[in-house]
Image (cartoon, rainbow, N blue to C red):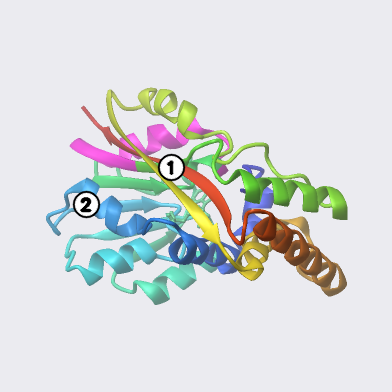
Amino acid sequence: MPGSDPDTVRAEYATSDSLRVRLDTHRLYSEQPDDLDDRCRRLMCLSGEESVLDVGPGPGRFEAHLRSVGHRGLLVGVDASVGIAVEAAGIAPSARWVVGDAQALPARSGAFDWAVARHMLYHVPDIPAALSELRRAIREGGAALVTTNGADSLPALRNLRRDAAEAFGLPAPGGQAGGAFPSTNALELLHSAFPRVETVLCENALRFTDAAPVANYVESTFTLGGIAEDTDLRDRLREWLLRKAQRAISSGGGVLHDPKYGALYLAHAE
Ligand SMILES: C[S@@+](CC[C@H](N)C(=O)[O-])C[C@H]1O[C@@H](n2cnc3c(N)ncnc32)[C@H](O)[C@@H]1O
């Protein structure tokens, strides 16, 4: 949900606390099983020997997953957040962790079999620059795996987020999921750097019967609003979110069903 303002993105990802809430929500409350790590690995058809550069890897779950299934090739994660790179080193210690920017990757040209950028390009101010960096980092015959959200993903959670911002005078969220890199224009942007791109579209939903995980998810998107230290505001916001979430669940006959749309792209270097 956060946009691409560098200060906002830096504050949001100083640690992975709020990201972890959202990742766990998707893992625990998706209608169909939603294991992005497994899906990406299968789509990449990895043999286990490939070198992989993961840009904006977060706390290293993908790398831990790859090692858990026996991947032996070099894994390098480049994240803009020092805090997150440190966490990732604890979670997947056999990968290499580097602090750096997607728009100027600290990587030799053609050094990797794969580049990966999952759910991160919408945080980058200059998306074409980041895409051309992904392309530069992979060898001839290599490929990039890129994922993002559909613009109309999770309408109920986004409405709740918008209403909460309005009610508490907090910064307004971006208008759509996927920010400036939603699935509707990702393909066109990818073609600016990659000659051949394959698309896999996914449809799923979050399904809640309890207000607490709804409140947790929406609350996690407010880290950047500068409310972290204001415990009174936090308490009032949480109470408000729980009440609204409970009302939405009751009016849905005991279920809040929120559709989500995602896209995975295999972008080939040639
Ligand atoms: C939504 S998380 C995605 C984490 C992970 N790729 C995944 O699929 O779970 C976005 C990550 O991108 C990182 N990030 C944001 N802007 C970046 C940039 N310009 N360069 C490198 N990393 C960036 C953040 O620090 C955060 O770890």
Q: Residue lying farthest front?
A: 253
- Compared to residue 8, the image places residue 217 above or below, namely below
Q: Nearer the viewer, residue 12 or 42?
A: 42
- Give the amino acid at mark 2: Arg
User: Mark 2: which secondary structure?
Assistant: helix
Q: Nearer the viewer, residue 192 or 174?
A: 174
| Residue 14 in the figure: left or right of residue 269 | right
Image location of residue 95, percent across then percent down? 31, 66
User: Mark 1: which secondary structure?
Assistant: strand
Q: Which residue is located at x 68 percent, y 40 percent?
A: 174
Q: Residues within 10 Å of mark 1 (few under 14, many from 20)?
A: many
Q: Which residue is located at x 61 percent, y 48 percent?
A: 1
| Residue 267 in the figure: left or right of residue 32 | left
Image location of residue 70, percent across then percent down? 17, 68
139 drawn magenta: yes
Identify the mark at residue 42; answer none if there is no mark.
2
Q: Quadrant of residue 38?
A: bottom left
Q: Quadrant of the C terminus?
A: top left
Q: Which residues are magenta?
A: 123-145
Q: Quadrant of residue 240?
A: bottom right
Identify the mark at residue 183; answer none if there is no mark.
none
- Compared to residue 64, the image places residue 131 above or below, namely above
Q: Which residue is located at x 63 percent, y 43 percent?
A: 3
Which is more N-terminal, label 2 or label 1?
Answer: 2
- Give the amino acid at mark 1: Gly
Q: Which residue is located at x 45 percent, y 58 percent?
A: 30
Q: Which residue is mark 1?
A: 262
| Residue 20 in the figure: left or right of residue 134 | right
